[in-house]
Image (cartoon, grey):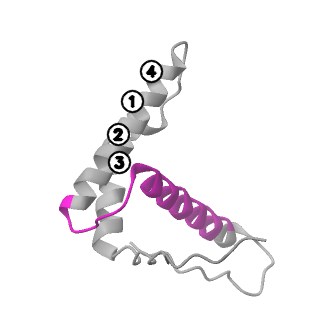
Amino acid sequence: MASPTNKQTKRRGNYSDCQIEHLCRFVQGKCAILFGKAGNCSERVQERKKRAWEEAAITMAGMGCPNRSGKDLRLLWNDLRSKAKKYRDSRNKTGESFCLKIKITM
């Protein structure tokens, strides 16, 4: 049986609209690097993608968004992309009496 630890982790705050907008601009500028195909030398390409996400984390830290890693930003981007796809798909449905309302912040 595991004993409870006295060390509690503090939850990080939500991203501000400004930070999300900055991330969107960063991804738009580095789209080819972040989402390009790997090709023959996939290890080098994966490392380049990882460095690009870490660069995004450094620029976000400069904006006052500390303790966010490149992995955190990549997950945020995937969540935003998923929400945008759900919103787009709900808008394209026919025969529905209601539209799926998803709050997309940007």
Residue 28's tag is: 3
Q: Are marks 2 and 4 in contact (CB under 8 Å)?
A: no
Please name the amino acid that badge 1 sits on.
Arg
Q: Which residue has dot 2 on it?
A: 52
Please name the amino acid that badge 3 sits on.
Gln
Q: Are marks 1 and 4 in contact (CB under 8 Å)?
A: yes
Per the rendered image, the range of residues in magenta is 62-89
**SS for dot 2:** helix
Residue 44's tag is: 4
User: What's the CA distance linking mark 3 and mark 4?
Assistant: 21 Å
Location of residue 2 with respect to 49 vertically, above or below: below
Residue nearer the viewer, 58 or 93: 58
Residue nearer the viewer, 71 or 41: 71
- Marks 3 and 2, the one that precedes in the sequence: 3
The reply, left or right, for residue 36 in relation to residue 67 is right
Please name the amino acid that badge 4 sits on.
Arg
Residue 48's tag is: 1
